[in-house]
């Protein structure tokens, strides 16, 4: 019976090892493969941490199993061994994890900087202004594009174009937008792109991402913002740049619709 | 948008088309069940008018037997609501005694997956109102295979409806999930969250909606309601429901909202017929004048017995006509001439009209468009109770304070397209104190639209756009 318990503790690290081994290939951790280059690097960081904790978990579990096995195989009546701490052992189990943590902290810094620190953003996003303003509101995302050919201003401008719950962005180049909130705190979360950024009242936060593959991507709110939190679903439509230009043109035509133009279909 | 007329053909045959089976809610204890509430007007009637005299039904019963409750919705064929389902007729009288399959002429194509079943109900003929379960469908022979043999055989030409009320049920379920906590189970704009919201959620029961594309006297169209669901209402708590709901679901929710509106309007009008003579207050006054309670009740009984049928017909005809009309092209406001191109001159003319005695937008919206005109400071009389409201300002038909829009914000609840503003001016905002200006010329409305759209970007509040002569000089600078 004693040996059975020792084997039981040996069993779990083996399961953990197998699960962690196959998890990345099966995509068990994430909703799907990251659809943005930075997203893939964020995933890599997750997997690095997964490897580290797996090694640590297996090591400690085997140590635990070993101690149990030793105890289980001891003869009846043998004396217990008492120790009063080991300075060097304590040093090891403090210093080694500290090094691991410092390593992780340093290793992730450029990904973090590229994601969050404005001066490390991709060059294109620094050169061009933000493509649009995304304003979170209980319980929807209101998008404001500048008039084609003009730059986005923080204050609404006469030619601005408005939509709700639908962002159209070009593929294959970094897209920057300003994130704001009209009321409480919300969070811009695009799971497939691995982008998550809080929208904080009073702040205008520049966020960027890049999508390689054309398609529809989810945008949801990731900060419980009220009873209608679940309603804050929107679509990020990634398409070739000329398609986006066409879309903006259509948006402009729709917004200037005066009910007379013959080619318009009034919804 | 995707208006389907096929179900309206059923209108002619029979009052109640089908009882729509409820959701699993029927197993719930009573206190957990959703129910429709009656309006204050109904509750203010004398008890006999509410509940009926002897075997004559009162307002509550008349309402319930036409609309049902959330668990058991009724599809009253008088209403121009797309309740859902396929209608058709029996193609040929089945031969033999045991009817286990049936040839049908259906209004639209019908498919039934393997293992699925559909519920069909006979509306006319000997077999009505039998309900049968269809277990298979042979599209080639257009033949339905029934789960069990029918007791009474139907005859050729009998009307049958498959899946009656499916849309209404879906609409109900979606509405209860996403809409009811603000707009209330009955559509009375009084859900649990309503009291925390400003502006208050719409109370549908007047059958009045603010942001429409229809003429001043017309109801709201399906497209208008769909547009609100798609775009939300900026500046209020009404969010957009796309992409959470797909087109089909939006359509179902719109139908259910129309159903609730019609229920509310029906109740309101019915109670209105009685409230002059039989409201609790009227009865008290009549008793004070020396009439006996017994006489009043017997008078009510006569009314219910003799005049109610006419009233009901009048009210339901009126509902059917007005709600059907709203979806026609005739109801849609379409300007005769295109927008006058935006220019300083047009804006100046717009501002002149805005300030003019005849139109006087400034009376409510203020000289600078801040929504603080003189009308916002007076005390109004409640048109129903004839008492002054406790707070100054304009009031809408829902008795809420009706703040004229601050035009400097650039938030347009009914939409920001020029056509939206045109329609707002042409038809007014229904239910609110914004009146219709349909007698203005197209160009005049467009000038005002151009001016109003420019207000948020004026260099200073109330800035008058330059007169025509100065434009050239200004653009040279």
Image (tube, grey):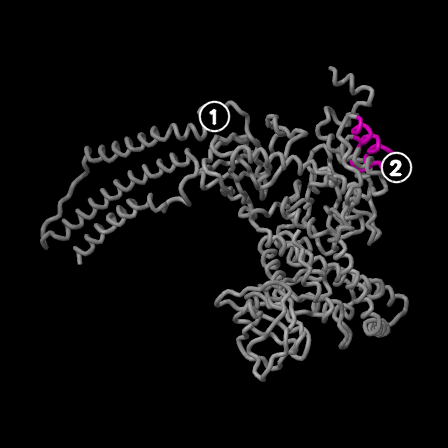
Residue drawn at x 55%, y 71% as measured from the top left: B134
Residue B351 in the magenta stretch? The answer is yes
Task: In the rendered view, tell whether residue A1 sits above or below residue A253.
Answer: below
Residue drawn at x 69%, y 41% as measured from the top left: A264
- Please state if A6 lies on the left or on the right of A260 as rendered: left
Task: Pick whichever, B400 or B293, lies toward us.
Answer: B400
Task: Pick whichever, B440 or B281, lies toward us.
Answer: B440
Task: In the rendered view, tell whether residue B475 sits above or below residue A8.
Answer: above
Task: In the rendered view, tell whether residue A158 sits above or below residue B219.
Answer: above
Q: Which mark is residue B358?
A: 2
Q: Which mark is residue A118?
A: 1
Task: Give neighbour class at mark 1: few <14, some 14-19, many 20+ (Cα, 10 Å).
Answer: some
Report the magenta residues as a range. B345-367
Q: Which mark is residue A141?
A: none
User: Whole-percent x and y of residue B42?
Assistant: 75, 63
User: Whole-percent x and y of residue B31?
Assistant: 59, 65
Residue at the far bottom in the pictured view: B97
User: Whole-percent x and y of residue A74?
Assistant: 11, 51
Residue drawn at x 55%, y 37% as measured from the top left: A168
User: Which quadrant of the figure has residue B185?
Assistant: bottom right
User: Whole-percent x and y of residue B168?
Assistant: 63, 61
- For the question of whether residue B432 can be seen, the reply is yes
- For the question of whether residue B72 can be seen, the reply is no
Q: Quadrant of the N terminus of chain A?
A: bottom left
User: Which quadrant of the figure has residue B282?
Assistant: bottom right
Chain designation of label 1:
A
Task: Assign a secondary structure to mark 1.
Answer: helix
Task: Assign a secondary structure to mark 2.
Answer: loop
- Please state if A36 lies on the left or on the right of A56 as rendered: right
Q: Could you tell me how far apart the alpha carbons at marks 2 and 1 are, in whole angstroms?
A: 56 Å
């Amino acid at each position: 019976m004693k040996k059975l318990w020792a084997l039981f503790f040996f069993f779990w690290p083996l399961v953990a090892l197998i699960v962690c081994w196959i998890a990345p290939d099966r995509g068990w951790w994430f909703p799907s493969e990251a659809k943005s280059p930075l997203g893939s690097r964020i995933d890599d960081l997750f997997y690095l941490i997964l490897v580290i904790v797996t090694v640590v978990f297996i090591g400690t579990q085997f140590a635990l199993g070993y101690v149990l096995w030793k105890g289980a195989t001891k003869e009846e009546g043998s004396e217990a061994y008492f120790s009063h701490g080991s300075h060097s052992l304590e040093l090891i189990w403090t210093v080694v994890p500290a090094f691991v943590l410092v390593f992780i902290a340093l290793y992730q810094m450029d990904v973090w900087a590229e994601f969050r620190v404005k001066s490390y953003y991709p060059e294109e996003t620094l050169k061009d202004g933000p493509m649009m303003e995304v304003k979170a509101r209980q319980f929807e995302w209101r998008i404001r594009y500048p008039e084609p050919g003009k730059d986005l201003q923080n204050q609404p401008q006469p030619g601005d174009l408005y939509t709700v719950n639908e962002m159209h962005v070009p593929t294959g180049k970094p897209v920057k937008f300003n994130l704001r909130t009209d009321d409480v705190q919300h969070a811009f979360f695009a799971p497939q792109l691995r982008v998550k950024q809080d929208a904080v009242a009073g702040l205008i936060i520049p966020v960027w991402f890049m999508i390689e593959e054309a398609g529809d991507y989810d945008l949801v709110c990731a900060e419980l913002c009220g009873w209608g939190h679940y309603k804050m679903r929107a679509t990020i439509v990634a398409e070739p740049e000329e398609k986006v230009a066409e879309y903006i043109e259509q948006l402009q035509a729709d917004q200037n619709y005066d009910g007379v133009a013959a080619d318009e279909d009034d919804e | 948008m995707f208006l389907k007329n096929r179900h309206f053909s059923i209108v002619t045959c029979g009052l109640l088309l089908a009882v729509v089976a409820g959701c699993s809610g029927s197993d719930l204890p009573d206190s957990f069940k959703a129910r429709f509430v009656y309006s204050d007007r109904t509750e203010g009637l004398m008890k006999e008018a509410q509940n009926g005299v002897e075997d004559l039904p009162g307002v509550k019963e008349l309402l319930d037997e036409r609309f049902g409750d959330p668990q058991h919705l009724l599809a009253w064929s008088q209403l121009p609501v797309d309740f859902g389902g396929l209608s058709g007729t029996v193609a040929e009288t089945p031969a033999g005694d045991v009817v286990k399959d049936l040839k049908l002429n259906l209004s639209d194509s019908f498919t039934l997956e393997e293992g699925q079943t559909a519920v069909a109900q006979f509306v006319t003929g000997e077999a009505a109102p039998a309900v049968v379960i269809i277990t298979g469908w042979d599209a080639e022979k257009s033949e339905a295979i029934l789960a069990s043999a029918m007791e009474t055989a139907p005859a050729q030409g009998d009307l049958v409806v498959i899946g009656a009320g499916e849309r209404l049920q879906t609409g109900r379920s979606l509405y209860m999930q996403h809409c009811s906590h603000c707009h209330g189970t009955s559509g009375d704009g009084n859900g649990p969250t309503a009291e925390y919201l400003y502006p208050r959620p719409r109370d549908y029961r007047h059958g009045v909606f603010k942001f429409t594309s229809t003429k001043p006297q017309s109801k709201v169209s399906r497209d208008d309601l769909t547009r609100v669901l798609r775009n939300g209402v900026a500046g209020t708590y009404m969010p957009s429901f796309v992409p959470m709901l797909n087109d089909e679901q939006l359509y179902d929710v719109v139908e259910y909202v129309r159903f609730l509106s019609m229920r509310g309007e029906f109740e309101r009008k019915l109670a209105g017929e009685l409230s002059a003579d039989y409201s609790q207050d009227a009865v008290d006054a009549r008793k004070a004048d020396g009439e006996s309670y017994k006489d009043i009740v017997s008078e009510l009984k006569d009314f219910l017995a003799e005049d109610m049928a006419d009233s009901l017909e009048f009210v339901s005809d009126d509902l059917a006509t007005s709600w059907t009309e709203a979806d026609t092209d005739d109801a849609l406001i379409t300007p005769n001439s295109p927008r006058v191109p935006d220019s300083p001159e047009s804006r100046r003319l717009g501002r002149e009209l805005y300030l003019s005695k005849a139109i006087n937008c400034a009376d409510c919206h203020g000289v600078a468009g801040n929504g603080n005109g003189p009308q916002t400071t007076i005390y109004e009389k409640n048109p129903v109770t004839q008492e002054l409201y406790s707070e100054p300002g304009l009031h809408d038909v829902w008795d809420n304070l009706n703040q004229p829009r601050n035009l400097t914000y650039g938030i347009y609840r009914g939409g920001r397209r020029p056509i939206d503003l045109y329609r707002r001016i042409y038809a007014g905002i229904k239910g609110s104190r914004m009146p219709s200006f349909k007698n203005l010329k197209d160009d005049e409305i467009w000038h005002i639209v151009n001016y109003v759209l420019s207000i948020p970007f004026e260099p200073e509040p109330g800035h008058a756009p330059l007169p025509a002569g100065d434009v050239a000089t200004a653009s040279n600078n």
